[in-house]
Image: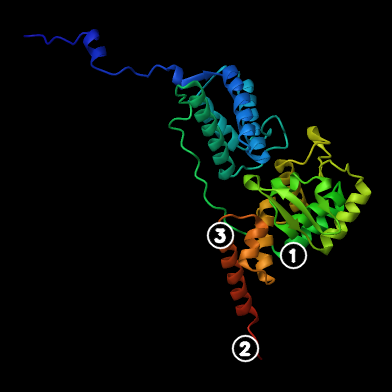
């Protein structure tokens, strides 16, 4: 009987690909070198006159990346590091995120998508600076950022939130914050950036720098004006300081942050017993837009007030306002209610 020869180990290895692809200098970068490049990137952003908000957001994401590397004892950053960082940022750990035990709220896909965009821009800048590719963002797909389902607060919910400020730890500050969000529809970042010197009490307005480093004037009504005057008189704000400062935790005395503002709205919503609605500063933006249109405002002035450069979002608010008007007519139709 003829015995069939088995292939040698040498021929077997040569006929197959290696079980893994060795990493190259393009696939990884030393964490300390990455941090050095970060300082150069932020400086380049300032030279190019990016908005303060853009620079602040980029700094924040990079600081969180360093924190993640230090906590995980990571000295070399690669694709797995980036994936794990994005996964952690999207998680809801019971012990809190970024070393803050209170930071455990769910993060939107839009927030994680912005982290991805910032890291991709940073890595592309490094590749350009050192004239060799850095591929740590390669094959890492951006999170799907679906448009928010717009569910504004009802008027009763707004009243409940205003009432909840009366029993908060800082009632005057929290009252004017809720009133401003409801009466202006400003972005959370815009509210956090207001300085006392920006406020014109007589003109019932203040100036903010919005997206794209664009400055615009925001107006508010008589109810807000009264609360604003009382707040400034009793708080004795510094003329060139920020209008709203944190009064609790590790950031006490520092300007309010977007996350701090979000936590405040969540606390007030819980105190007010709100259910089936997202409690966030952005929900106030939706609420303002719909209420403005229902009260007779027009689409084009709303677009200017909100600082929109694209009419698509404003058009969604118009559609909502019309749908609400139709529902109200069906409910209160004179003919249908004639007995």
Q: Which residue is mark 3?
A: 311
Spatial CA span between label 1 and label 3: 29 Å
Residue 335 numbered mark, or none: 2
Mark 1 residue crowding within 10 angstroms, few (<14) / some (14–19) / many (20+): few
Label 1 element class: helix
Q: Which residue is mark 1?
A: 156
Q: Is residue 336 left or right of residue 101?
A: left
**Closer to the N terminus: mark 3 or mark 2?**
3
Label 3 element class: helix
Q: Quadrant of the C terminus?
A: bottom right
Q: Residue, x 26% and y 13% (percent of image)?
A: 13
Q: Is residue 120 left or right of residue 267?
A: left
Q: Nearer the viewer, residue 289 or 278?
A: 289
Q: Quadrant of residue 317?
A: bottom right
Given this view, does label 3 or label 2 mark the residue nearer the observer?
3
Q: Quadrant of residue 203?
A: bottom right
Spatial CA span between label 3 and label 2: 37 Å
Residue 331: x and y in percent read 63, 78
């Amino acid at each position: 009987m003829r015995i069939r020869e088995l292939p040698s180990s040498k021929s077997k290895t040569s006929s197959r690909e290696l079980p893994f692809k060795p990493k190259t200098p393009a696939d990884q970068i030393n964490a300390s070198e990455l941090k050095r490049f970060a300082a150069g990137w932020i400086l380049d952003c300032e030279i190019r006159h990016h908005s303060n908000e853009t620079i602040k957001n980029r700094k924040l994401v990079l600081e969180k990346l360093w924190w993640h590397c230090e906590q995980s004892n990571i000295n070399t950053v690669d694709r797995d590091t980036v994936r794990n960082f994005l996964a952690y940022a999207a998680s809801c750990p019971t012990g809190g995120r970024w070393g803050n035990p209170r930071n455990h709220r769910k993060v939107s896909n839009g927030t994680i998508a912005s982290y991805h965009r910032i890291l991709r821009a940073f890595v592309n800048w490094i590749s350009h600076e050192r004239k060799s590719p850095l591929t740590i963002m390669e094959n890492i797909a951006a999170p799907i950022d679906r448009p928010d389902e717009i569910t504004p607060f009802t008027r009763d919910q707004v009243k409940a939130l205003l009432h909840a400020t009366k029993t908060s730890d800082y009632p005057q500050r929290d009252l004017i914050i809720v009133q401003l969000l409801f009466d202006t529809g400003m972005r959370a970042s815009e509210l956090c950036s207001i300085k006392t010197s920006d406020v014109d009490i007589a003109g019932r307005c203040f100036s903010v720098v919005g997206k794209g480093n664009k400055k615009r004037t925001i107006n508010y009504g008589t109810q807000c004006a009264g609360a604003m005057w009382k707040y400034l008189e009793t708080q004795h704000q510094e003329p060139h300081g920020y209008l709203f400062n944190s009064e609790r935790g590790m950031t006490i005395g520092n300007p309010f942050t977007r996350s701090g503002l979000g936590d405040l709205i969540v606390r007030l919503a819980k105190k007010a017993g709100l259910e089936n609605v997202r409690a966030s500063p952005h929900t106030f933006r939706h609420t303002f837009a719909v209420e403005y249109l229902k009260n007779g405002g027009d689409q084009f002035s709303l677009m200017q007030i909100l600082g929109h450069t694209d009419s698509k979002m404003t058009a969604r608010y118009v559609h909502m306002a019309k749908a609400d008007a139709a529902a109200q007519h069906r409910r209160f139709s004179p003919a249908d209610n004639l007995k």
